[in-house]
Image (cartoon, rainbow, N blue to C red):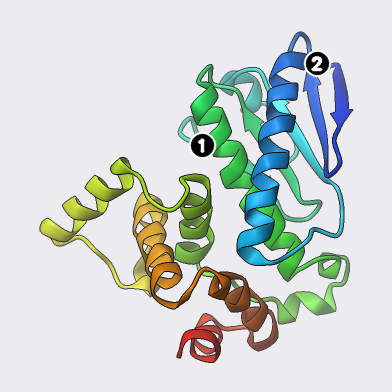
Amino acid sequence: YKDFDWSYIQTRHFDIHFYEDAYPTAKFAATVLESSYVEISNELDYVIQKRVPVFVYNSHNDFQQTNIISSLIPEGVGGFTEAFKNRIVIPFSGSYEEYRHVLHHELTHAVIYDLLYGNMFSSLLSRQRLFNLPLWFAEGYAEYSSRHGWDYFSDRFVRDATINNYIRPPWALGGFLAYKQGQAMVKYIADTYGEEQLGKILRKGKVHLTMNRALKETIG
């Protein structure tokens, strides 16, 4: 395990932590995060209440050594957002497009955590009254936003799932299918009922605590 000598830069909404010679990578992240935040804020009609800490690792091997969460990180994980302090943690793989995508994807989680939970995690009692956001919506919206609606990879994946009959009902979605089928479902909601409904669904979920009631209250 390495010792990381962290530095950080600040933007209007983010504290971006980096180490060694990763200042250019951190600057790239700063630009991506601020531009992505504008898109997410407009899509959800929400302004975050607190600055978001972001930790950038120089490689996946370094990333797997993080102690921001206690569990071991599998090789396939491209980043995560920790809910308790709303921290984004991400490795740089060498691909700037993939880096952009994962930064935007994880930022959607940070904004939604802020919208739904805010300071509620500080209270043990409030944890009994948290909206359990379904994986298909959480990851589906993250992909919808970071892929700007739809993309060829999502299209071929969902087509294959449809042709070969492994599409699942929403309550049974898990794994990678939740990302791609979820993206298709979120896109359907946005196309059919208007993108403004996405933020309304989250707000209704915060009140009613179930996705069924949130959907019924917003899109019927």
Q: Is residue 2 left or right of residue 196?
A: right
Q: Position of residue 80 (x, y in %)?
A: 62, 43
Q: Residue at x 25, y 54 (%)?
A: 158
- On-image quarter of the N terminus: top right
Q: Position of residue 27 (x, y in %)?
A: 75, 23
> Secondary structure beneath disc 1?
loop
Q: Is residue 96 above or below residue 118?
A: above
Q: Amino acid at mark 2?
A: Asp
> Secondary structure beneath disc 2?
loop
Q: Nearer the viewer, mark 1 or mark 2?
A: 1
Query: Mark 1 — residue?
Result: 77
Q: Position of residue 191 (x, y in %)?
A: 40, 68
Q: Is residue 185 left or right of residue 118?
A: left
Residue 72 visible in the picture: no
Q: Residue furthest left?
A: 163
Query: Mark 2 — residue?
Result: 3
